[in-house]
Image (spheres, rainbow, N blue to C red):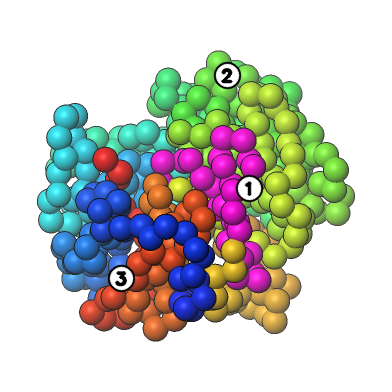
Amino acid sequence: MALLIFTMACDDDDDSTGAEPLNFAETESDYVSIALFHDNGIDVLRANNGQIRSSVNEALPEGARFYTSSTGRHLVVVNRNGNQVRFFDSGVYFHIDHTHDDPSKWLETTVETPLPTHFKSSGDHMVIFNDGDGSITYVDEERLENSNYTPDVIQIENTVAHHGVGFRFTNGQFVTTFKDETEPEGLPGSVRFVDINGSVMGDNGGVETAGIHGSAVNGTHGAFGSRDGVIIVDGERNIDLVENTGKLDTARGFWIATMKGHDDANLFFGRAGELGAFVVDPVAKTIDVLYEGDDIEGDMFSFNGEYYLLHTSDNRIRVYDATNANMITERVVEMVDIPEVGSANGRSSRSEIEVLRKMNQPSPVLICSEQFLYVLAPDRQHIKVLHIRDLAHVHTIELSSTVNSMAKIGFTD
């Protein structure tokens, strides 16, 4: 497996915040787990006792991206270069009125499509956009365990291959990007509602932009980043453009191009690579500055959507209340800077789309549960646990062997 290895250091000064000691083992849910990626397989670790609960030994596809479903049960392996999507069942899931803690396994179900790329998950539903032909793959997560189930590859009418994105609302409607064939660089210029058959429902709402990248969804509202502003859509098939404000400037290339959403959060958060992070309210249709700076390395929601976290290149973690975007705490956590690929600053030798794709990927060294932030240490044999609320170091998990990266799975009971 050729995953990039990013590392973080654990320093002693993180342990002394003066806070009341927290019993991590008793506080963390039994169902919060961490997928540990090795060269030859995946270990599933139970976080609160540090024990490996299941292992699957199989070489992982080179260059594939791993995404966690909204339920926390599955890892979706998007192998763009291999034109394939696979599914890893963690075995940790909630079913109607009881919980399961079964062995992990690769599912037999696979999907073969041209250049699967952008992944979105909301509720029990997942959508992968296929850049190779502009289609979308729809996955009903509850049906994945059925060996006869085949996810739907939806061919969208009147579209062409492009670097796009799509998602599904709770009411069953899909929204996806469309591309004008004259637009350079492969970015789409509008969005439309479609049904399960790929038929277009209505028009683009009169919203046509010079380029779209990134999206967020919470089940009832969605948003797309664009060069001209943020496109807001809802389950009533409304499409509106909230135009760029402040330093966001289409002409200078300063636009919100990656976005994050969560089923339990009303606000969306977006990033403009040269400017910082922004808060997008899809109901009020507003864009406000959250953080100014060109040094953001990554961002994420906590497991239940209560917190939004920013990681900047000065090794600082900032924690925000995701309901109102107020900052709760911030702290420098010693870590090795995440290396960029291609040049001294990691940007000049890569295309715009390559940079945007990089920004959209989940962190391989930072993951959140409901209450805790997990940090992979520089030796790749320890995981440091910080309490999200104050970023106090509360525990360190010692691993029996080194790992390349990690991802969150499971759920909070």
Q: Identify the element where label 2 is drawn.
A: loop
* Residue wearing tag 1: 327
The C terminus, quarter of image: top left
The answer to if 263 sits in the magenta stretch is no
**Residue 317, horizontal then vertical, whole percent:** 58, 61
In the visual, does 317 lie left or right of 129?
A: right
The label number, if any, that marks residue 397 in the structure image: 3
User: Identity of the amino acid at label 1?
Assistant: Met
In the visual, does 194 lie left or right of 162?
A: left
Crowd class of label 1 (few under 14; some 14 to 19; many from 20; radius 10 Å): some
* Residue wearing tag 2: 237
Q: Quadrant of residue 136?
A: top left
Evaluate whether residue 166 shows in this view. no
**Residue 341, horizontal then vertical, whole percent:** 60, 76
Q: In the image, which residues are magenta?
A: 303-330
Foreground residue among 181 and 339: 339
User: Identity of the amino acid at label 3?
Assistant: Ile
Q: Quadrant of residue 181?
A: top right
Number of numbered discs present?
Answer: 3
Decide which of tag 3 and tag 2 comes sooner along the chain. 2
User: Identity of the amino acid at label 2?
Assistant: Arg
Q: Is residue 340 above or below residue 287?
A: below
Give the residue at the far top of this rendering.
236
